[in-house]
Image: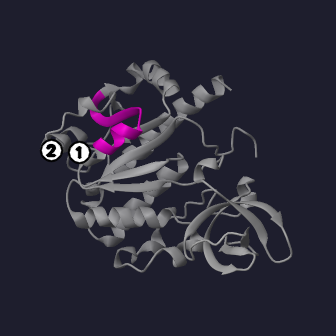
Amino acid sequence: MSFDNRPIRNRPFISFAIPSSIVSEAPDLREKTRKLGYVSRAAAIFRIEEILIYRDDTVENEELVYNILTYQEVPPYLKKRLIPYSPLLRYAGILPPLKTPHHVYPNVFDTVFREGVVDRITGRGSIIDIGLDKPGLVLYKKLAIGSRVTVKIVDEVNSYYIVDLISRDEVDIYWGYRVSRFSSMSNMLSYAIERYDLIIGATKKGELIYRIENELTKSLLKSINILIIFGGPRDDIDEIAKKENIDLSHYCSYFINFVPRQGVESIRTEEAIFAVLSILNYLKEKTLSRNR
């Protein structure tokens, strides 16, 4: 796999925030699930690091969004062991597979990294289910049974792959997204302002993307972690902020209309996510290629 096609983790690292109301207009659990499948696929396609969920309507919607997006991130071979039964996952079978590097066989993306769950302890160390033909073995370490770990395959013996424990930040290719949730937009922003050096509000009321493309590209070059904030099906980000008495200009460096002259009355949040991330990915990769 060439450098240009390998899903490397490269700065700036991009994340996005969505409101719990993203599923509010879907008529039933099946359609809510389907909608969130699109969100998780967008996150995987564009190598999103973190999805932030902020509550702007019901606790039930927040719980659903969190559960399904979390379920999607877990590798298929670990789902039964790590995800307890929940009626919220009744229609999980219709969710599209992500097929990210940590979900498929290592040879697909030419990687030695793997996700696993600690299965049992032996005299030699901890046995880890890594979803391959043989389990992994971490030598001389007793890990918590049932815990999820990230490992690097370093050797192979008759019955095991010998693996080392690593941090997910040590993986050089895209390794899935984290999910965080907050009881309000205000709480989400308090978290974000400490962790993201560039926050962008995606809104049709913002500056047209082509007018600030060059300035935005320069900001991307200077940034490490970027957060994009999306609104919901009923309220745009400024309307949600107004209900909480928030001045978004204190947090957002840009308010951008990424779809000038949209041909529909409103763009659904999951559609906006694809549109916005596609443009940001283009700008990010163009910048990367120039500086390689």
Q: Looking at the rendering, in which quadrant would you find the C terminus?
A: top right
Label 2 packing within 10 angstroms: few (<14), some (14-19), many (20+): few
Q: Identify residue for label 2.
A: 244
Q: Is residue 258 visible?
A: no
Would you identify the image quadrant in which residue 98 lies? bottom right
Q: In the depicted view, which residue is nearer to us: 68 or 271?
A: 68
Where's residue 200, x and y in %? 36, 34
Q: Three-letter amino acid code at disc 2? A: Glu
Q: Is residue 156 visible?
A: yes
Q: Is residue 2 above or below residue 100?
A: above
First-in-chain label (1 vs 2) = 1
Where's residue 229, x and y in %? 33, 41
Mark 1–mark 2 contact, CB under 8 Å?
Answer: yes
Q: Is residue 151 above or below residue 219?
A: below
Q: Three-letter amino acid code at disc 1? A: Ser
> Does the magenta portion include 63?
no
Q: Residue at x 57, y 70 (%)?
A: 76
Q: In the depicted view, which residue is nearer to us: 286 or 163?
A: 163
Residue range highlighted in magenta: 190-206
Give the Cα distance between marks 1 and 2: 7 Å
Side (left or right) of 55 relative to 257: left
Side (left or right) of 110 relative to 146: right
Where's residue 217, x and y in %? 49, 24
Q: Residue at x 53, y 78 (%)?
A: 80
Circle 1 SS class: helix
Q: In the depicted view, which residue is nearer to us: 187 or 292?
A: 187
Circle 2 SS class: loop
Where's residue 69, x and y in %? 42, 61
Q: Identify residue for label 1.
A: 186
